[in-house]
Amino acid sequence: MSQTSMTDELLRAEGLLVQGQARQAQELLARLAEDAEEYVDRNCPTTDELQWFSFPTLFERLAYRRVEDDPRELRDVGEPLDRLYADLALACIHEGDYAMATEALKHAVRWNPMGCEYRLNLADLFRIDGNVQEFLALSYSVFERASDARHLARAFLNFVGYFVAQDKPLAAASALRAARRLDVRDDSLDAALDQAAGTDHDPDLVSDEQAGELLSAEGLPDGANAEVAVCLLMCATDAADLGQRDTAAQLTLRARDLVGEEATMELLRLIRAEDEEGGDGNASSY
């Protein structure tokens, strides 16, 4: 089972979904998943690709990747298996089989543990099912892994709804203010801001300082994922040194989206200074 043949089959299944043939797509994807898992078990049970997933956070993954001098574009080696299971989950949802969709998304997360979109979609299914603990666990985990500000914003929106349901309007206002500070274009965020205006969880009821304190008390960051930004910039400097300008630019922009322009420039300056002094490149020192 080569990646090429897998991709061809995925395209065929996705075509079936587009044509409204969800049942046929589900059957094809389930068969593909079974074949793929059998292939992996038989051919690569202890390969470096599988060991790679033992690193639970993006911080650790990127630090490891830097040591290995491998500043490639951020993508996970489980591809296209994560895509396969995400497609299977979508087909199951079209068929109304939410239990199977949940299991499929669990496998998507397994093959792409940094895929925050899969985590957030899985959290949504747990919310629909009334499984609050799993919903919260997945939503919290996004803050350790997200390298995309849109995913951070969506995680904050999860907590806005949760805090409103828990009758914690100021915590909800703080989470919404943190999401707004990320400055991302998102229809869900815009709708949440419109709905909150003039209510007891209006984000304008709290200052940035108050929001940070309230979120910290709930175990949440105030919006910026500094450790992830440092790791992104470390990889960006490595890519730039190797002449991979497009990769360096992409990683730098993602870091800027997380912590802002000023903080990004300061972190780049510190990383360069550390490299010139012969430091060990450990992101935790920043």
Image: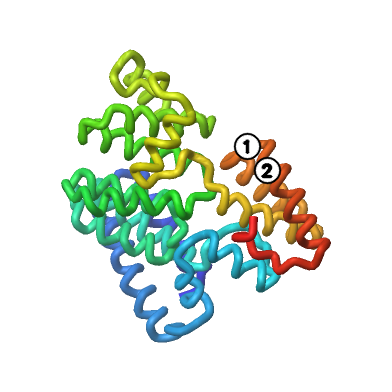
Amino acid type at circle 2 is Thr
Position of 215 compared to 70: left or right? Answer: left
Question: Which residue lies under the disc numbered 2?
Answer: 264
Question: Which residue lies under the disc numbered 1?
Answer: 260
> Residue 167's image quarter?
top left
Closer-to-camera residue (160/30): 160
Query: CA separation, marks 2 and 1?
Result: 6 Å
Closer-to-camera residue (54/79): 54
Element on which disc 2 rests: helix
Instruction: Classify the position of the C terminus by image quarter.
Output: bottom right
The residue depicted at 80 percent of the width and 60 percent of the height is 241
Is there a contact, CB below 8 Å, between mark 2 and mark 1? yes
Residue 2 vs 62, above or below: the answer is below
Q: Position of residue 253 (x, y in %)?
A: 65, 43
> Coloured how?
rainbow
The residue depicted at 68 percent of the width and 63 percent of the height is 71
Q: Position of residue 39 (x, y in %)?
A: 40, 80
Crowding at mark 2 (Cα within 10 Å: few <14, some 14-19, many 20+): many
Q: Position of residue 278 (x, y in %)?
A: 79, 67
Q: Which mark is residue 86?
A: none
